[in-house]
Amino acid sequence: MKLSPPFWLLNLYPPSTSVNRAERLRSCLGALLGIAVTGWLSAQVMGLTLATVWLMAPMGASAVLLFAQPASPLAQPWSIVGGNLVAAFIGVSCAKLLAAPVPAAAAAIFFSIGAMFWLRCLHPPSGAVALTAVLGGPQIHAAGYGFMATPVALNTAVLLLAALLYNNATGRRYPHAQRAETPHPHLTNDPTPTTRLGFTTEDLQAVLKDYNQVLDISFDDLELLFRRTETQAFRRRFGATQCGDTMSRDVRAVEFATELDEAWQLMHTHRVQALPVIDRARRVIGIVTRSHFLNQVDADGHRSLGTLGARLRALLHRTPHSHSSKAEVVGQIMASPVKTAFETTPLVELVPWMVDAGMHHVPVVDAERRLVGMVTQTDLMATLYETSLAHLGPAPTTPST
């Protein structure tokens, strides 16, 4: 008879992680290199002898955070530097003031956590630093406040430098600074359109305040996860319409050396607001819009010519000389680099670009990044309207009397 473990015991076993094998290996290798470099450099500076404490055990816990969870607020530079130094100072002070080791250790942890909360540098391994200062033995007690410099500050600095280099070299943003809020494209005080109907930043802040617990994730990452969850839910409900399904394929484009007058006439003839700029292999290198022409009119200082029309004609008029003080070709006024989408990109992913960031046109490229189409705000609205109607189904019929 096969016995299954009790239900409450199964609840204690955590679910499998969503991190893939490559990320696990990246974390392990980072910790290996970080500790190896920290230990070797510290030994060289302090002297590799049995009488010298050159590598602290708390650095192992710090390595887990810095390399396996570099996005955690607990793993940021100020957290490890401030937390370790404050904890070391408090631990040494408690060891000097209280002779009994257990009360001294308890007091060191109490004051260290309080100080880290106050200074916003909460770093769990720093609790072990405080205990090391109290319970580390005669060598550490003899060092006194010098324990803060070596090995604490030295170990911390080397491990932090290793994390900075390794994480960024392997594609992980570190330090994981809070991202600034995306400004409204029209520079008004209104929230961006995608946040008017969904949850707001204030809603999330209110929930976290009510939750009243420390979360091992930054506020901006938490908000980003919720936004992506909303996008995923929308995609599931309304279908994953791709850019290739709705884009304009017969797209007019220009090259870097296309003259301004030719590009302007092309916009006027086809009644378009933007032209992608491509190289000879049809790879997108920029985009030029009517706004770029109008901005250039002011930038080139044609105000003395009077009306806007006169200034625009002066900009478009080709200079007959070999040298010119004004822009002559599209490549001189285009926006570059430009965001592009693939044919297989879900259309819903373009919503934040167009609605919040103020983009009106998104060039679509193939696997070799060659121009194959363009998605405009009009295309986006028409597609979302049609998919919404399809989701709603036929309108209810009114029963005849």
Image (cartoon, grey):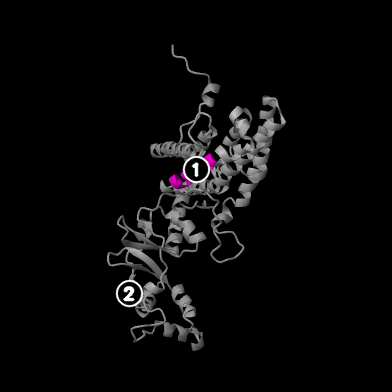
In the image, what residue type sits under mark 2? Ala
Of mark 2 and mark 1, the one earlier in the sequence is 1
Q: Is residue 161 magenta?
A: yes
Q: Establish if 238 lies above or below 332.
A: above
| Residue 306 in view of the camera | no
Rendered image quadrant of residue 326: bottom left
The extreme right residue here reads 97
Give the SS element for disc 2. Answer: loop
Alpha carbon separation for disc pair 2 and 1: 50 Å
Q: Which residue is mark 1?
A: 158
Q: Which residue is mark 2?
A: 257
Q: Residue at x 56, y 59 (%)?
A: 192
Q: Residues within 10 Å of mark 1 (few under 14, many from 20)?
A: some
Q: Residue at x 41, y 60 (%)?
A: 339
The extreme bottom residue here reads 305
Q: Establish if 206 lies above or below 378.
A: above
In the image, what residue type sits under mark 1? Val
Where residue 251 sits: x, y (%)?
33, 67
Q: Establish if 240 lies above or below 284.
A: above
Q: Establish if 25 lies above or below 167.
A: above
Give the SS element for disc 1. Answer: helix
The majority secondary structure of the magenta stretch comes to: helix
Q: Is residue 72 magenta?
A: no
Residues rendered magenta in the picture: 154-167
Total count of labels: 2
Where residue 157 sits: x, y (%)?
52, 44
User: Which quarter shows the N terminus?
Assistant: top left
Rendered image quadrant of residue 133: top right
Q: Nearer the viewer, residue 92 or 20?
A: 92
